Image: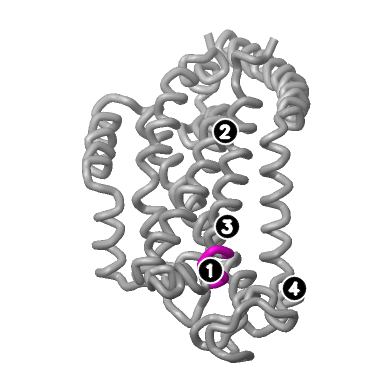
C-alpha cells in the first residue's frame, strides 16, 4: 500500500509540474497579448503619458521648481510674470514651485493609501474565499459593517480623532478602502479554488498559505489591478477634499487640495485665478490619467476579449 501511495503522489507531482510549465508558457503569451491590447487603447496611452510626466515632476521636483516652495520670494498675490510664471500666493510664495512640490504629497496619498488597502483587502478576501464556512460568514458581516457607514463622514471623524497629516490621511483612506477589494478577491477565489491544480495542491499536502499566495492569488491579479487604478484616483480626490476643508495636509506643506482653499474667497475666485486654477487643473489631469489607465487595464484584462 505504501508503494502505491508513493507512486500516486509522484504521479500527482509530475502532473502538477507539467501543468505548471504549460501555465507558465500560456501566461507569457497572455502577458504579451495583454500588453498589445493595452498599447492599442488610445486613452490609456494618453493617460500613461500624462501620469508619466507627473511622476517625473515628482521625482525631479527640486530641480524643476524655480524657488523653495515655502520661501517668500515676491510680493503678496502678485499676478503671473517672467519671474513667477504662475504668480505668488497671499504670503508671497511662488505658486509654480508649490504646485510642483504639492504633486509629491497628492500622489503619495493616492498610491500609499491604495497600497495599504490592497494588502489588507487581498489577505482578508483570500482567507474568506478559501476557507469559507463560518470564517467567510464572520468576515462578510464585518465587511457589511464597514460599508454601512457614510464614507466621507467616517473619514472626517477619524481624521479629527487622530489628527491631520500626510501619514494619517493615507492610513485612514487605506483602512476604509479594503472592503471593496476583499469582496473582489473573495469572489474570484470562490471560483478559482475549485480548479484542478488547487485540488492537486491540497492532495499533495501543501499548506493553505502556500496554496493561497503561490497558486490562487496570482490568478486574481486582474480585478485587483483595476480596482487599484480607480482607487488611486478616488484617494487623490479624497485628499484634496480633506485638505480643502482644512482636515488634510497642513500648511506650510503644499498639496493640491490646500492650495485650493484660496478659492473660498470671492476676491480670489474673481480677481486671482492663478491661485486656484492651476491646482484644479492638476487634480483633473491626475485623476483623468489614472482613470484612463484603469480603463485600459480593465479592457486589456477582460477575458471575453481573448480568443
Residue for badge 3: 281
Residue for badge 1: 273
Q: Considering the numbered disc 3 on the image, is that residue within a helix, a strand or a loop? A: helix
Relative depth, front residue between 240 and 157: 240
Residue for badge 4: 64
Relative depth, front residue between 123 and 302: 302
Q: Tell me if mark 4 has few (under 14), some (14-19) or many (20+) residues whose alpha carbon lies within 10 angstroms of its own.
A: some
Magenta residues, as a range?
Answer: 273-278
Residue for badge 2: 221
Q: Earlier in the sequence, mark 4 or mark 2?
A: 4
Q: Earlier in the sequence, mark 4 or mark 3?
A: 4
Quadrant in the picture for residue 130: top left
Circle number at residue 179? none
Q: How many marks?
A: 4
Quadrant in the picture for residue 268: bottom left
Q: In the figure, is residue 240 to the left or right of 217?
A: left
Q: Nearer the viewer, mark 4 or mark 2?
A: 4
Can residue 257 be seen by looking at this rendering? Answer: yes
Q: In the figure, is residue 186 to the left or right of 301?
A: left
Mark-to-mark CA distance, 1 and 3: 12 Å
Mark-to-mark CA distance, 1 and 4: 23 Å
Q: Considering the numbered disc 1 on the image, is that residue within a helix, a strand or a loop? A: helix
Asked if labels 2 and 4 touch by Cβ distance under 8 angstroms, the answer is no
Q: Nearer the viewer, mark 1 or mark 3?
A: 1
Q: Earlier in the sequence, mark 2 or mark 3?
A: 2
Amino acid at each position: 500500500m505504501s508503494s502505491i501511495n508513493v507512486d500516486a503522489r509522484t504521479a500527482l507531482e509530475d502532473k502538477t509540474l507539467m501543468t505548471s510549465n504549460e501555465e507558465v508558457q500560456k501566461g507569457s503569451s497572455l502577458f504579451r497579448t495583454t500588453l498589445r491590447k493595452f498599447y492599442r487603447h488610445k486613452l490609456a496611452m494618453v493617460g500613461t503619458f500624462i501620469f508619466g510626466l507627473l511622476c517625473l515632476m515628482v521625482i525631479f521636483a527640486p530641480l524643476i521648481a524655480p524657488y523653495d516652495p515655502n520661501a517668500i520670494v515676491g510680493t503678496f498675490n502678485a499676478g503671473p510674470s517672467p519671474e513667477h510664471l504662475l504668480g505668488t500666493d497671499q504670503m508671497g510664495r511662488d505658486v509654480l514651485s508649490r504646485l510642483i512640490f504639492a504633486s509629491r504629497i497628492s500622489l503619495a496619498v493616492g498610491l500609499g493609501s491604495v497600497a495599504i488597502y490592497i494588502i489588507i483587502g487581498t489577505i482578508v478576501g483570500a482567507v474568506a474565499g478559501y476557507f469559507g464556512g463560518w470564517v467567510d460568514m464572520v468576515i462578510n458581516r464585518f465587511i457589511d459593517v464597514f460599508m454601512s457607514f457614510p464614507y466621507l463622514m467616517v473619514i472626517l471623524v477619524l481624521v479629527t480623532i487622530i489628527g491631520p497629516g500626510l501619514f494619517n490621511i493615507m492610513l485612514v483612506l487605506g483602512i476604509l478602502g479594503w472592503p471593496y477589494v476583499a469582496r473582489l478577491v473573495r469572489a474570484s477565489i470562490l471560483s478559482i479554488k475549485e480548479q484542478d491544480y488547487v485540488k492537486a495542491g491540497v492532495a499533495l499536502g501543501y499548506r493553505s498559505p502556500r496554496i493561497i499566495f503561490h497558486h490562487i492569488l496570482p490568478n486574481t491579479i486582474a480585478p485587483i489591478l483595476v480596482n487599484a487604478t480607480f482607487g488611486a484616483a478616488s484617494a487623490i480626490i479624497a485628499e484634496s477634499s480633506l485638505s480643502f476643508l482644512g482636515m488634510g495636509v497642513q500648511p506650510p506643506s503644499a498639496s493640491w487640495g490646500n492650495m485650493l482653499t484660496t478659492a473660498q474667497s470671492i476676491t480670489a475666485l474673481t480677481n486671482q485665478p492663478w491661485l486656484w486654477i492651476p491646482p484644479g487643473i492638476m487634480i483633473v489631469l491626475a485623476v483623468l490619467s489614472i482613470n484612463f489607465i484603469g480603463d485600459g487595464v480593465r479592457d486589456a484584462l477582460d477575458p471575453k476579449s481573448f480568443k
